């Protein structure tokens, strides 16, 4: 079941300049259910570095219908 009251808003995308204490994500939750797990997963998925990430293509692949 999808709960429209929960989700993640990205406040600082890949390559954005951030300083200590700057928010990078806004996590919306319902009364804290699953909050610890969500925060751990999000923390593991974010890397903050002195160098920006390598550029990625805007189009990853093209799907054609045969």
Image (tube, grey):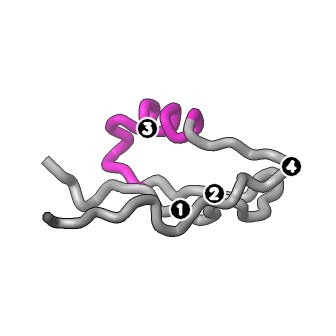
Q: Earlier in the sequence, mark 1 or mark 4?
A: 1
Check residue 35 for magenta coloring.
yes
Q: Position of residue 42 (x, y in %)?
A: 52, 41
| Picture quadrant of residue 44 | top right
Q: Position of residue 48 (x, y in %)?
A: 74, 45
Residue annotated with mark 4: 50
Closer-to-camera residue (5/25): 25
Check residue 58 for magenta coloring.
no
Q: Are marks 1 and 2 in contact (CB under 8 Å)?
A: yes
Distance Cα–Cα, label 1 vs label 4: 20 Å
Q: Earlier in the sequence, mark 1 or mark 2?
A: 1
Q: Are marks 3 and 2 in contact (CB under 8 Å)?
A: no
Residue annotated with mark 3: 38
Q: Position of residue 50 (x, y in %)?
A: 86, 49
Q: Residues within 10 Å of mark 1 (few under 14, many from 20)?
A: few
Distance Cα–Cα, label 1 vs label 2: 6 Å
> Which residue ends up furthest to the front in the rendered image?
66
Residue annotated with mark 1: 10
Going 81% across and 51% down the picture, which residue do you hit?
Answer: 20
The label number, if any, that marks residue 24 in the structure image: 2
- Mark closer to the observer (4, 3): 4
Going 32% across and 38% down the picture, which residue do you hit?
Answer: 33
Q: On the rendered image, what quadrant is the C terminus found in?
A: bottom left
Which portion, as a residue range, is magenta?
28-44
In the image, taking residue 36 as reference, residue 15 lies left or right, namely right
- Mark closer to the observer (4, 2): 4
Secondary structure of the residue carrying numbered label 4: loop
Distance Cα–Cα, label 3 vs label 2: 15 Å
């Amino acid at each position: 079941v999808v709960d429209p009251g929960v989700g993640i808003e990205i406040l600082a995308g890949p390559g954005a300049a951030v300083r200590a204490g700057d928010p990078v994500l806004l996590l919306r939750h319902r009364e804290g259910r699953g909050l610890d797990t969500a925060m751990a997963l999000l923390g593991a998925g974010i890397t903050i570095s002195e160098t920006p990430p390598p550029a990625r293509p805007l189009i990853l692949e093209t799907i054609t219908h045969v």
